[in-house]
Image (cartoon, rainbow, N blue to C red):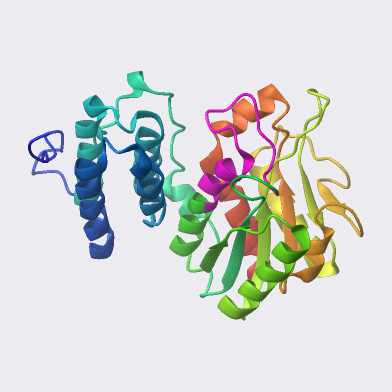
Amino acid sequence: MSEQPVNPKRGTAAEELNPPAESTVKRLQQLIGVAWTDWDEPEMKAPTLAFLDSIEALNSDEQRSKAEARQLITQFWGNGDQLDEFSNLLASWAEGDFHVSAFDPLSAVETAPAVADDAIADLPMANGQQVAICIGHTASGNGSGAQNKYAVIKDEHKWNEEVAFLLRDILISRGASPKIYYRTDGGYSSFVAKQSREIRTQQPNCKCAIELHYNASANPTSHGCEFLCYSNSGERLARELVNAYKGQFPEMRLRRDNGVYRISSGNGVGWLKSVPPPAVIVEPFFSSNEQEMLFFDGKKQELAMAYAKGMLNFVNS
């Protein structure tokens, strides 16, 4: 590893390239430098993933490159044979050259195709409205979520974190002002109080909030989606999310009241009652159902699209 490679796979000079924003290019260049310095250091894998996740991807090409880069880090960090592939992928992204991919699909699990730009363009436009994306559960320890048996990423929190970043990027591209929130407190009451304060402070005009989850059951045949809410405004948000979800996944079963589950007690009600804006807990499928888990593991971008459409329809209503 004597020198960082330039991208040998880019298209011809005659091809019209559409590079990302200058700030994104700089961060991609920084990330290439980090990889070439720390690729063999196991303790740098998590910080490098966090750095990648902080880079905004505002169209389907960028989102695909970001997903492929994340997969390379997740599966091949420390494998010197993949460092060139990773660097070339980021170099292509920085140049706006998406005609080729540096990612070798034969050496890893196949990634899902990106959502087409015209599909994103069909989404409603926002006008700077603030929206909250909350990732359910903690990353580990007390408060951690379900561990699925079928996907590459087993942890509920980490699986939904990928959806959260995709959702954030789509919402930004449509003119909204999203912010991602994490649960860091294991105790439920302290977590609810803390996250409510964070939203009030950081997004005082927040129009809606969703908390990302997936369902699980001891019965492996349980299936379908449900969107949990508490208030009247929360139910309106839930209906918009269900309609968008059903449009994206018409084959999926809607549980409860056509996918809406209005609760007054039990798991999740504390968060639904306490956060300032209309709020919904999304449970789009059962991770304990092998068919559903594997299906949605390849549909994270489409799932993020459905969430984005529901939220945008709600803030514009």
Residue most toward the right?
264
Name the residue rendered at 76%, 40% in the picture. 225
Q: Is residue 254 magenta?
A: no
Q: Is residue 142 visible?
A: yes
Where 290 sits versus 78, above or below?
Answer: above
Image quarter for residue 310? Answer: bottom right
In depth, the one of 42 and 87 nearer the eye is 42
Q: Is residue 103 left or right of residue 239?
A: left
Tell how many labels.
Answer: 0
User: Is 234 positioned to the left or the right of 137 in the image?
Assistant: right
At 84% from the left and 40% from the top, the residue drawn is 255
Whether 137 is drawn above or below 249: the answer is: below
What range is drawn magenta here?
143-164
Q: Position of residue 208 (x, y in %)?
A: 67, 68
Front-most of residues 236 and 132:
132
Pick whichever, 101 or 77, lies toward us: 77
Tell me if residue 161 is in the magenta stretch: yes
Can you say which quadrant of the picture contains the C terminus?
Answer: bottom right
Q: Where's residue 274, x and y in %?
A: 78, 70
User: Can residue 18 be seen by looking at this rendering?
Assistant: no
Q: Identify the residue at horizontal 22%, vertical 46% (top origin).
A: 32
Residue 55 image position (x, y, % from top left)? 36, 56
Q: Locate residue 173, reporting x and y percent.
A: 44, 61
Q: Is residue 142 left or right of residue 58?
A: right
